[in-house]
Structure formats: C-alpha cells, structure tokens
Image (tube, rainbow, N blue to C red):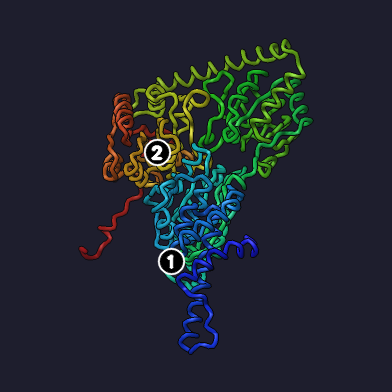
Amino acid sequence: MGAAAFARLRRPCVEARRSFSGDGRYAGRSPDVASRSIRATKRQAREENAMKELIKQYLDNGISRRQLMTGLRALGMSSIAVKSVAQSLAPLAQAAPPAMRSVKGTGGALFVQQLKAAGVQHVFFNPSTGDYPIFDALVDEPAISLIKGIHEGAVVAMADGYARVSGKPGVVIVANIGLPNAMTQMVNSWKDQIPLLVAVASVEQEALGRDLFQEPEHSEVMTQPITKWYWAAKTTGSIAETVRRGMKFASTSPCGPVFLALPTDTLREEATAAIWEQSKFDVPMRIRPDKDDIAKAARMLLDAKNPLMSVGDEATWCRAGRELIELAELLGLPVAGQMGSLGFWSRPFPTRHPLFIGPQLRDMRYPGKPDVLINLGNKYGERPAPGTTLISIRLDPMSLARGAPVDLGIVADIRLATADLIAAVRAMATQARLKEIAEERIARTRAYTDEMRAFRHAIARENAERTPASLERIGLELEAGLDPDTCYVCDVDSGKTMDPLLSFGGNDKQYIGTGPNVLGWGMAAAFGAKLARPDLPVVSVVGDGSFCFSGPQPLWTQARYEAPVLNMVLNNQSYNNERNRIWHYGGRQFQTGRDMTCYIGNPDINYAQAAQAFGVEGEVVKEPAGLKGAIARGKRAVAEGRPYLLDVHTYRDGIGAASTWHPPYSVAQARSRRV
C-alpha cells in the first residue's frame, strides 16, 4: 500500500486516537509534561506500526475483515473509526491476489502455512527438540495430520509409499542427528525418482562449527548424492520460499527427493512472509513430442520384421496404461517389462495380456533378436542386442541415451507420445494392412506366452507340497486369495520366483516395489500406500531379512493409526538369494559347504510375536496347507479395520540351502570371570 493511500486511511485512526491520548501538543511545558509527550509519541508510533501490520495482513488475505476490526479495536480505536477504516480498505482487499497471502509468525508457522498452500495433507515425522515450532504451529492446523514413525528410515519409507500411490510429494521431518538413518531409505526414492521433501531442524547458525551437541556440520551437503536439490534456510523470512522451491523441485519431472535444513533459530524467530499457492510455481511437464520424430518412429515400426516394445516406470507416472495396450495391439508388438532388482517398481502393462512376455533381457528366447526395439519409459530399456535399431522415448532427458547409443531419442510425456505414435501409424497404413501385421504377430506371441504360463504353473504345482511352503505355493495362494484391486507392496528379493504367478496391471493388482532394492522399506511403504488410498486392499510381502532391516517399527505406526494392512513375512531363516549369488562363484564357502554369512537362524525369530509386541495381531504359518486359512483370517482382520501379520515359514532353496552351519563363537565362553 502506497504512502498516500495509508495517509488517507490514517486520518480517522488519528482522530480516534486523540480521544484517549490527547492532541500531542506539549511544547514549552514542564519536563514531566515533555516526558509524557515523548512517551505518547512513542506509543503513537507503536500503534501506527501495529495498525500498518494489521492492514497489510488484511490486504494480503492473511486475516479476515472481522479479525482486522477486532485488532483495530484492541489498539484503542472507536467503533466508528474502525468501521470507517474497514470501508476504506474494502476495494483494495477485493483487488488483492487470491493466490497469495501474507502471514506473520514463527518460522515453524511459515513452514506449515506454505505446506498447507501446497495441498499437503500429511507430514511423516520423528520428532526432535529443535523442530518444536513446527509442531506448535500444527496444534491449530487441522488440515494437516501428523504421522509418527519410530525410526527415521521407516518415516522416509512411509512417505515414499504414500508418494508412489498418491502421486503427491511425501513430506518428512526428522531429527538432524537422525538424518543418516533416513538417508538409507532415501536411496530408494532417489533411484526410483519419487518426490519427497525431507526437512530437519539443524543447529543454530551461530553455533555452526563449534562441535556442539548433536552437530553434524552442513547436513545439507551430506545428502547431495541422493537428492535433486538441497538448501539451508538462512533467515526466518526465507523459509516459505525455500519450501515452495523444494516442493517444485521434488515434483517436477524427473521427480526425486529434496532436502531442507532449517536452523532452529530461524524456526523460533518471527517474520512476515508471502504464502503462495504451490500451483503458481508448478510447471506442466506434459511435453508433446516432435511430429517429425514421431513419424520416423512410426515408419520404423511399420517396416520392422521382428519388433519389440519395452515399457517402464515412466509410463506409470504418465498414466499411459491404455495407450500402451492400444499401441501393442495395433501392431501386434510383444511387450517386455523393465528389468531391475525386483523386475521394476511398477507394472504399467497387464502381465496377463497375451502380448506380455516378461522382463526385458539382452538375449531373449522370444522373440529372439529384435530388429527394432521401442523403449517407452524404461530406465533399463536402452540395452538391446548389437544390430538392433533403438527408439527410446523418455520423460527424463538426463537418463535418455545415458549409457548406450540410441538411433532415435525423443524426450516427451509417455502418454502423449504413445497417443501420437498410434495416430501416426494409423495415418500411414490402411486398416487392412494393420490387421494383417497384428494378427500374425499376436498369434505367435500368444502361443509363446500360453506355453510359458503353463510351464510356470507346472513347476509351481510340482513344488506346491514342499514343507515349509515353497515360494511358488505362496504365489498361487496369494493369486487365489487376494482381491483383484489389491495394492501389492513387495520388498523381497525372492519375488522374482513368486511374482510371475500373480497378475498385475490393467484391471489386476497394482504392484509397488523398488528398483535399487534397499531392504527395510516394505511394511512402512505399505502403510503409506494405505494412507494414500484407504479404500484399496494393501498387502505387504517382505523377506525375513527385510523385516530385520526395518525392525517392527512400521507395525507400531500401522497399529497407532489403525491402518488395515495385511503383512506377510517370508521366513526362510536366511538371506537366501544373497547366499545363492555368493556360492555361485564357487569359492571356499561353496567348496566346504560352510555358510559364513547368510544363515539367520539360531536363534530363530518369531515375527508374529514381534508384531504382537508392537500392537499388531499375527500368527505363524508352518505348513503350506495352512496358507489359505491364514490369508482368509488376515483379510477378515483387515476388513474389521486392523493390521495383521503372517509369519510364513518358507522353503529355503538354491545352492547350499540345506546348510545351517554358521561360524561358532560364544562371548560367554570367552570370559575369564563370571560377570
């Protein structure tokens, strides 16, 4: 507001003030009178400053008209003067930008208000003393709920699972000294490009470098390898802007974690800052591809003799599922999925579709060596056999052609690019020719996928009666017992054996996993998934190794917030796949039959009892015949609104699976006295 405008508004205020403070004319009076005059002048200045602040907040949409009038009366203005000021301000208030409001408060309050303006509904946290101003501000802010985890890694994994399922950034607050715990799970988010905003209350700025209590210097730099962006808010007034920028960077493709350090002094102190709706800073990233490039790609596919289509996680982010199916069926393209530690973290193409042939490998039995490979959003899809023409359409320009040459590279939204490609193909060929191309390819691919499906189920039936339960038997029971709309959260390396027996994508189950396979993620991520979509059935499948990495801490959060998640622990008392890979090299462990590293029995862990200690009911399943009933009981508990855990004893297979030997050592026997 300009000086002239304020002067016009000030007149009724000054007149009202004279009714209780005098006219201020004390020249030539006694010292006592002069002293009173000085005090009155200072009081008048304070009142004017307070009035300016109230008016500014009102014009910036920070307070309502009623709050303005109440504040002016508290400054001593008469009702007539208050009404006059409010009427004078009305036209100006109506002209204020609706997307911005001015807020005065602590740094914690500014942090919360900017999160609210970004549409944040949940904050995942583990508390520390320094971030108390944030939690103080949340006492009177019911729009944002606090979700507590009792380990920093679990907190990040919860936010990660929430972001994967909701499509919104997950917001995390953890202790400064607990950041290294959180960073382990941030690796999953970084590698899979999941949007997170991770904040800590760092030490006061004047204390930096003094090696004080719990002071890791420059914690923001520590996160550099696994974040898109990191920053420290140097002033209280900059906190809101820092949050806005962090949310923008996290949610702009390619997405990823960002890190904010908020010094405790900036959180405590007060300032006035502009709070903007986050939408004003969001940049649409639905990039349409170049028409000439799409025409080239369409011609390559039409002329190909043995094409292959590869799909990946970027297709999931772009919601391109229907377009992928249409393109594959239009040209009869065999479809391969993204190959990673667990296959891929999403399943954008229906695995029961007759054109889906499984994970993409460099040397594939079917369809053999493709002459043209089109990669749609697959991070690992740019590794074709030598001599294959590669078309790669990616959302992430930094990842496109990063490790291998491409013949035609296109940066675009996967959904838009696929739709444009479909249109270009239809424009280049008659319906009769397209039908001729597709029918022959679909028939060949269907014959292969039917054969492979029958082969997998034959092996599964052969192993179904093993005791303890085989992974194949568990996969068959889950496929039969789970609802088709289940969100299946997988954190087990053995999933590659079990998952092909389950149906994902399209109208079937939704698959959520991780690419880098940093264990300890699954049960916490399942909670985040359930929080994002309460009406979806959510099942968490973890290995016993993964359970031990996270501990039962995520179960405490499931119990506290009444999250109906069905948890399954595959308990084979071993880091089974790790041992298989180690023994594959044929070293001394293989030669002697001594497992130096991977057996985790003795003592045997009862995961159902561990769950009960953290408030989650559970049971042990020792026989394969008990699986069906146990899954049904778990589903009943979930339907009643309670989390449940199944500790499923699982057959240990592979090289050296029968060995329970481990290096013996006894601390008790090493004592020289009985203490």
Q: Residue at x 57, y 61 (%)?
A: 238
Nearer to me, 553 or 424: 424
29 is higher (above) or lower (below) than 387:
below
Q: How many neighbours does mark 2 have within 10 angstroms: few (below 14), some (14-19), or many (20 or more)?
A: many
Q: Residue at x 52, y 83 (%)?
A: 26
Q: In front of the other: label 1 or label 2? A: 1
Q: Quadrant of the C terminus?
A: bottom left
Q: Tell me the CA gap for discs 1 and 2.
A: 34 Å
Q: Quadrant of the N terminus?
A: bottom right
| Residue 373 percent coordinates (x, y) | 68, 28
Q: Report the residue that reaches farthest toward the left.
A: 674
| Residue 430 percent coordinates (x, y) | 75, 13
Q: Which mark is residue 214?
A: 1
Nearer to me, 191 or 578: 191
Query: What residue is disc 2 on?
Result: 543
Nearer to me, 667 or 376: 376
- Classify mark 1: helix, strand or loop: loop
Q: Amino acid at mark 1?
A: Gln
153 is higher (above) or lower (below) than 51:
above
Q: Is residue 624 left or right of residue 505?
A: left
Q: Amino acid at mark 2?
A: Gly
